[in-house]
Image: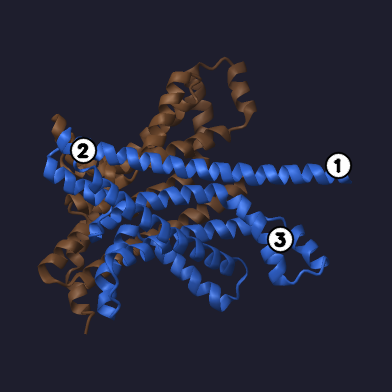
Chain colours: A brown, B blue
Amino acid sequence: MIWNTDFAISILPKLLKGLLITLQATAGGTLLALVLGLVLALSARSGSVLLARSAYGVTELLRRTPLLVHLYLLFFALPEIGIVLPRLTAGILALGLHTGSYMAAVYQSGIDAVPKGQWEAAQALGYSRFDKWTRIILPQAIPMMIPSLGNYVLLMFKESAILSVIAVPEAMQTAMSIGNQTYRYFEAVTVVGLLYLAISLPVAAALRALETRLAVTRQ
Amino acid sequence: MEKFLSYVPLLIEGLKVTLAIFTCALVVATLFAIVAGTVRFSGPKWLSRPVAALVEFFRGTSCFVQLFWCFYALPLFGLTLTPFMTSVIVLGLNVGSFGSEVVRGALEAVPKGQIEAARALNYSPLKSFLHILMPQAMRIAIRPAANLMVDLLKLTPLTSLVTVNELTRNAMVMRNQTGSTLGTLLCIFAVYFLLSSLIYFVMNRLEVHFIHRKAVRAASTRVAA
């Protein structure tokens, strides 16, 4: 018998504990990505050529290179120049940087979708630059972006399994260490896969529903 | 520096394997995307339901988990593949699943009048699909396909974790032997960046080529009329 249900159930508490770390990493990465994406998008739309060019450069450097290489750079290469990061911090940084570069594009298209009249009205009413962004443009742009941003958060949640390569004790790493101890990789990896599905499928469905509802209310 | 240079052949060896995985997985992904996307667009329910389930499965977990699952689980079912083959299949099906949504979306984006016109001109369903729908959908799909190709390239380092000797794995070997981590990793960082840029360059050219050709043809028919 290759599948042992009792064993699969017995490892569930350990894996759920790992999943908690996965969620922690996702939450940290999301926070970082949301801020980084916004900074990159605002720089790209700032009107300053230098800022816009460097934002584009950073975005493309991050988007065109693999997450695993980012993770290795942060965890293995930075100590060489004297910066030693704890495992989880390095993982959160890698996830946040990588996803932030994708979110920058989402923010940009959200900002571009705010009707031109709103920009002109803000100008006509004498709003300062800061007030224009924080009171007029972003409050209208951000709700439209929520489904897309949510999809990237979901992607990050799934991709966070990669943190196991630097031994962050998240769900996948827990499964691998159970496998190392018991040689029952099959149950461990299967249960972890099911846990990922149990979270990602409902969230994906909810995001799709939200997207439809937003599209309807906009019309 | 001398020490560094003596490892260049190792990196080139790894680059070759990376490109081999990329190419093979791209073929798997393209085939799967076209078949699954078409089935979900216009296939019978008994076929499109299981295909949808497979696509959702691949989209619901990360490539990393799928790779390890196949690495450990397939041998238990008596299917022993080399790590290279496993990687090609998993990466191909993973990216192909995302690609099937692109294909479906592109097929849906072709105006309905095109199919009706094909029917009016007495095209058979197969002919109207191959000659009318597909060429127009392909044009729409070029840009998202470029993004997926870059995603595929960025997934190839994961195969190093199931012992495929590709670029990232060889770089880590070199790192262990030279003790220079930053230099080695920045080197492969640059290689991946250049490869991704090359993909975008080629795909942009392709897009310009197709759209330009379409525009020229449209202009010439206008003149003829």
Are the residues flagged by discs 2 and 3 in contact, CB closer than 8 Å?
no
Looking at the rendered structure, whether the residues under marks 1 and 3 are on a common chain is answered as yes
Are the residues flagged by discs 1 and 2 in contact, CB closer than 8 Å?
no
Which residue is located at x 53 percent, y 29 percent? A137
Left/right placement of residue A165 relative to residue B211 reads left
The mark found on residue B5 in the picture is 2
Where is residue B135 shown, x and y percent of the image? 66, 57
Left/right placement of residue A67 relative to residue A13 reads right
Q: Earlier in the sequence, mark 1 or mark 2?
A: 2
The mark found on residue B223 in the picture is 1
The answer to whether residue A164 of the structure is visible from this angle is yes
Which residue is located at x 26 percent, y 48 percent? B168
Nearest the camera: B130 or B36?
B130
| A14 lies above or below A162 | below
Q: Residues within 10 Å of mark 2 (few under 14, many from 20)?
A: few
Where is residue A159 shown, x and y percent of the image? 32, 52
Looking at the rendered structure, whether the residues under marks 2 and 3 are on a common chain is answered as yes
Name the quadrant of the N terminus of chain B: top left
Q: Which marked residue is nearer to the observer: mark 1 or mark 3?
A: 1
Q: Which marked residue is nearer to the observer: mark 1 or mark 2?
A: 2
Q: Chain of mark 2?
A: B
| A139 lies above or below B53 | above
Looking at the rendered structure, whether the residues under marks 1 and 2 are on a common chain is answered as yes
The answer to whether residue A24 of the structure is visible from this angle is no
Residue tagged 3: B132
Where is residue A151 shown, x and y percent of the image? 43, 50
SS type, badge 1? helix
Give the residue type at disc 2.
Leu
SS type, badge 2? helix
Judged from this view, the residue extending furthest toward the right is B225
